[in-house]
Amino acid sequence: MKSNTKSPKSSITLPPAELKLVLHLQAKLKAKSKVEVVRRGLHLLEQVTERENLKLAYRRASLATRSDLPQELAELDHLAAEGLDE
C-alpha cells in the first residue's frame, strides 16, 4: 500500500533566459538547488505582497481619520503646556 504522505511533485519548464537567471541566482545565493531559488523567490514575493497590502490599509486608515485630526488637536491643545513652569 502506497503512503499518501509525500508532497505531490510538479515540474515546470522555463524559457532559457529565465532558467539562466535561476542558475545565476543559485550560484549567487549558494542555494543547494534550483527549487530552493524558486521557493525563496516565492516567499519574498509573498512578503512584498503582504507589505503592500498593509501599506494600503494604513493609507486608507490615515485618510479616513485625517479630517478629524485638527479637531482632536484643538481639544488637546490646552494640555501642551501643562506642568511647565512659567
Image (cartoon, helix red, strand yellow):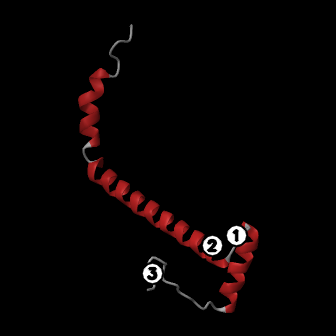
Q: Amino acid at mark 3?
A: Ser
**CB of mark 2 within 8 Å of CB of mark 1?**
yes
Q: Which mark is residue 3?
A: 3
Between 35 and 80, the one nearer to me in the picture: 35
Provide the residue designation for mark 2. Answer: 36
**CB of mark 3 within 8 Å of CB of mark 1?**
no
Q: Closer to the N terminus: mark 2 or mark 3?
A: 3
Q: Residue at x 74, y 67 (%)?
A: 30
Secondary structure at badge 1 equals loop
**CB of mark 2 within 8 Å of CB of mark 3?**
no
Density class for disc 1 (Cα within 10 Å; few <14, some 14-19, many ≥20) is: some
Q: Residue at x 56, y 88 (%)?
A: 11
Q: Residue at x 37, y 56 (%)?
A: 59
User: Where does the N terminus fall, quadrant-wise?
Assistant: bottom left
Q: Position of residue 24 (x, y in %)?
A: 74, 77
Q: Position of residue 13 (x, y in %)?
A: 60, 91
Q: Disc 2 vs disc 3: which is toward the camera? A: 3
Provide the residue designation for mark 1. Answer: 31
Separation (CA) of disc 2 from disc 3: 25 Å
Residue ranking furthest to the top: 85
Q: Closer to the N terminus: mark 3 or mark 1?
A: 3
Density class for disc 3 (Cα within 10 Å; few <14, some 14-19, many ≥20) is: few
Q: Amino acid at mark 2?
A: Glu
Between 33 and 82, the one nearer to me in the picture: 33
Q: Closer to the N terminus: mark 2 or mark 1?
A: 1
In-image side of 38 versus 73 (left or right):
right
Residue ranking furthest to the front: 1
Q: Residue 84, located in which quarter of the rendered image?
A: top left
Secondary structure at badge 2 equals helix
Secondary structure at badge 3 equals loop
